[in-house]
Amino acid sequence: MKTKLLAALAAMVLGAAPLAAQAQQGPTLRVGMAAQDVGRLDPHFAVSTIDRVAVAWMFNGLVRFRPGSINPAEIEPDLAESWESSPDGKVWTFRLRRGVQFHGGFGEMTADDVVFSLQKAANAGSSAFSADYRAFQSVEAVDPYTVSITLRENVPSLLGLVTNYSGGYIVSRRAVEQRGADFARQPIGTGPFALERVTPNTSAEMVANPQYYRGAPQIGRISYRFIPSDASRDLAFQNRELDLNYGRADQTWVNRARQVPGSTVDVFEPGELTILSLDVSRPPFNDIRVRRAFAHAINRQEMVRWRGPDVSREGLSVVPRGYLGFTADNGLLPFDQARARALLAEAGHPNGLTVRVVHTQLPEMLNGMQVIQQQLRRVGFTLDLQVVEHATFHQQIRQNLSPLVYYAAARFPVADIFLSQFFHSRSIPGTPTAVTNFSHCNVADSQIDAARVSTNREEQLRLWAEAQRLLVENVCAVPVMETLLVFARRNNLDYGYELKGSMSLGPLITEQTRLN
Amino acid sequence: MIGFILRRLLASIPTLLAVLTLVFIIVRVVPGDPALVILGDQATPEAAAALRARLGLDVPILTQYVRFLGAALTGDIGTSMVSGRPVFEEVGAVLPHTIDLTIASMILGIVVGVPVGIWAALHRNGPIDVAARLLSLIGLSFPVFVSGIFLLIGFALHLRWFPVIGQADLSDMGDRIHKLILPAITLGLVMAAYITRVTRSAMLASLSEDYIRTARAKGVPWRRVVWVHGLRNASLPVVTVVGLYVGILIGNSVLTEIVFNRPGLGKVIVGALNQRDYTMLQGLMVIYCFLIVVVNLITDLLYGVLDPRVKAA
């Protein structure tokens, strides 16, 4: 009995030692995030920045954006070594990398896990991103290392749906089935870091995955700390208690952070486009003259000066710049207060107009709206802001209680996603397929639909440009500005790549990342 | 004594039920959809409906209430809708931090507030009294998020005596105490300001009583008159204020927790409210109410110790 116990103990020690020793070899990266806690670390439910940043370190997709880039043209192999598509673009075959291990002894990643993951991502009951996968007809395992995806109709970027973003992450089927609802707090992926534990309201601790297929990470651990107070987080960074600090997209913050000795401020893509959606289905914005007056009243340059030229830029279309299909050649109405006043008078409002608007109390959005409010006041629009708590705002704008909606968003960098979610009639709140079309516009439906299924890239780009011109011409929404992401890091933190963008909304920490 | 405690605990059950019912209804009446918070802004109505069904939010509110009460009676107060973690686990992780901060602030408040209040009362309208009143006014007027930041800049950033991140390792008592000092000073000084004012006015009232004059006429030493006869009677309002303030402190220390990056009950309550985490809020209220009941019970027991007439009644 005693011998068995000793043997078991020895086995435990010997079995555990290599992992622990290897995990502790590298230094600990301390990250400060502006959040109170993580939400769900099941990647298919990771919708907030705090969750998205973390799951990107723990999971892989079949393909990935080259670290530091959000350019879809630079997508490269990840869990899939290679892929090919049928001539009509409706059948895609991915050949998987062999020997990739899941964290926690959950075994080798196979086609079965990939099929399970993509079906999970496409299911409304098990994913927040199911709408992205509507075009999926079937996902099948051809053999343990080959997966075939069949589409009902063409999509602008199939690779975008299987990349390291939103629903594209691959999870361990066995772990999901074994852990059930607990998977959200005990996730199992294949990434360079594995979750060790989450201390509620304090931190998430991750350890390096020594079996990571690209090589063991050079950083041993990540301490992912939840510090909601900007002032305290900045003080902690100044005090060298953090190596990486979530920053505010604000010029004053950036200037101050740049003064911290031994540190660097990274400003990177994707830009979050702020648009003002005008509900064209009811007064006062059912009158095109009122909408045009509104558009002429918005001074984008002033908004950029207010937010800061290093962290923001003018919104030039109803699609963020840099997205595949973006065009600035869309007839965007210029800032012109005299023209705005004249149009308002022409529309029967010579003494101005009051619009009751529901808006969030979230400071960065409220401050922006207050600047807009002042700009509009100069031409005769009075915004009667009904400031409500953020969750209430999201509910009420989806109940069509606000004729004007200030909304900021970044999406997968292909025009189709933004156009479909914000401007297609299928996405109008109140419809069964509602997303975020607060303008109730449908003027570009046919162009958006045709572009989505087109297999001719030139034709697709032409249709997306036409859609943008129609939406701008009809003033369904007014683009305001694009706000970039900001993080500050100590100079001894080397990402191992040049950070120009990150779809996970935070720097990727890879096996190449070093703390010198 | 045991009978008294049991009676008080039994009497608290209706209060607990009333609070729970109110919280249950209020969180559901307030606009804001937990499904939207969890699924984000790209979720379809279909996904939101599926999640609501999984969370049990698709059934009538009365059914939800009965389910909740039934589970609560078996000791199950549910799992967080947002994180999926059991509420007990979430609260258990932060409660020791809250208790540490509450007790430390209370001790500091009493240790500073009571002597200063007595001193001010004994030197009524003199420079000491004026200074004490002024300082207590400043203490009450200064928001904790400002005093906390000042303390962090001075003692953490410049002197480097304390860390900015106050998330203590609960298994390390030294670390726990070290990271408690600045937050306890921040909250304790506000409490001291309250206690100073109450002690001062209670002592002034007590020292003007006939029995004090009698005691002095009988030649009882002044020190004994103040500390035994005066203070004992002045203690009742002080204990009342401390009891009330401790209750407030448990839930309202959120700003201190945020500034010093400490986990705590206040922060969890605010987070659950923002995220419309119904189950978390309900569970938190059960625990919060229980703590308030315990604090009130201790306050009542202290009344009996300080004034035997209360015990007899």
Image: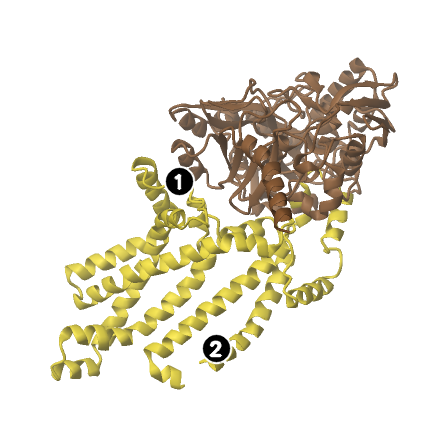
Chain colours: A brown, B yellow
Return the x and y of residue B201 as percentages of the image width and height. 26, 69
Using the image, name the chain to which the residue with label 2 belongs: B
**Does residue A275 appear anywhere in the picture?**
no
Front-most of A26 and A413?
Answer: A26
Q: Which of marks 1 and 2 is nearer the N terminus?
A: 2
> In this picture, is A368 found above or below B67?
above
Return the x and y of residue B142 as percentages of the image width and height. 34, 50
Numbered mark located on residue B115 in the image: none
Return the x and y of residue A395 as percentages of the image width and height. 66, 46
Using the image, name the chain to which the residue with label 1 belongs: B
Q: What residue lies at 23% left-to-right and 78% top-to-bottom? A: B229
Q: What residue lies at 42% left-to-right and 71% top-to-bottom? A: B298
Q: What residue lies at 58% left-to-right and 40% top-to-bottom? A: A13
Numbered mark located on residue B5 in the image: 2
Numbered mark located on residue B164 in the image: 1
The span from disc 1 to disc 2 (Cα, nearest Å) is 42 Å
The answer to whether A44 appears left or right of B163 in the picture is right
- Count residues near mark 1 (Cα–Cα under 10 Å), then give few for <14, some for 14-19, many for 20+: many
Image mark count: 2
Front-most of B161 and A445?
Answer: B161
The amino acid sitting under disc 1 is: Val
Q: What residue lies at 77% left-to-right and 34% top-to-bottom? A: A113
- Where on the picture, by quarter, is residue A141? top right
Q: What element carries label 1?
A: loop
The amino acid sitting under disc 2 is: Ile
